[in-house]
Amino acid sequence: MKNPKKFIQQQTNQMLNKSTEHLGQFKQFLFAPNLITFVISVVVGNSFGATIKTLVNLVFGLFDFTRIWLFSAQHTAYYNRITQPFSEFSSSLITTILIATIVFFTIRFINEALIVDPVNKWGYNQVHADALQLQKQNEETIALQRQILTELEKLNQQRDSR
């Protein structure tokens, strides 16, 4: 080794370049639309499943309450057949709404703060973006056609007036 300082500097640069490359790959993996879609599906789906379960418990609690109240010999109403499932359903519904809100704002933060390229943003739809661009071009074309039609009508009127 002729110059150990230069060798150490080259090794350091090489290591930094590789770690930066790996960090970029990890960021690309972490913000991949398929992974984010999967995570959202699992989180919101789990919460929604719990809400449906408590809703079913509430409905069956109402049936049990009605059955006991109508067909029981003592007509004793068991209000906890309704109140407990109702409170569980309310709690689960509020939890689902809060989880969905948190997921929404997290994805919004990721899209606005961490991802610069709009193509890489979660929820980016190339077909929709193309459709919007085509719609704008069609509107411009229609405006130009109307302008041409107006000019042709003026020319026809001038020709007919002669």
Image: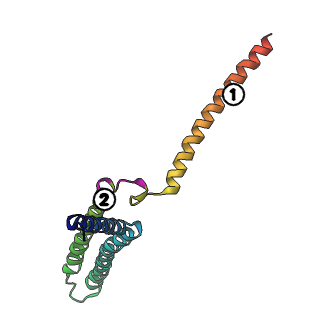
Q: Position of residue 143 (x, y in %)?
A: 60, 32
Q: Position of residue 22 (x, y in %)?
A: 32, 69
Q: Secondary structure at mark 1?
A: helix
- Residue at the disc numbered 2: 110
**Above or below — where is 75 with respect to 9?**
below
Marks 1,2: beta carbons within 8 A: no
Mark number, residue 149: 1
135 sits left or right of 34 in the view: right
Magenta-tinted stretch = 112-118
Q: Quadrant of residue 76?
A: bottom left
Residue sitting nearer the eye, 70 or 98: 98
Residue sitting nearer the eye, 110 or 20: 20
Query: Which amino acid, by three-letter code, is at mark 2?
Result: Ile
Residue at (64, 27) in percent of width and height: 147
Q: Secondary structure at mark 2?
A: helix
Q: Position of residue 108 (x, y in %)?
A: 31, 56
Q: Earlier in the sequence, mark 1 or mark 2?
A: 2
Query: Which amino acid, by three-letter code, is at mark 1?
Result: Leu
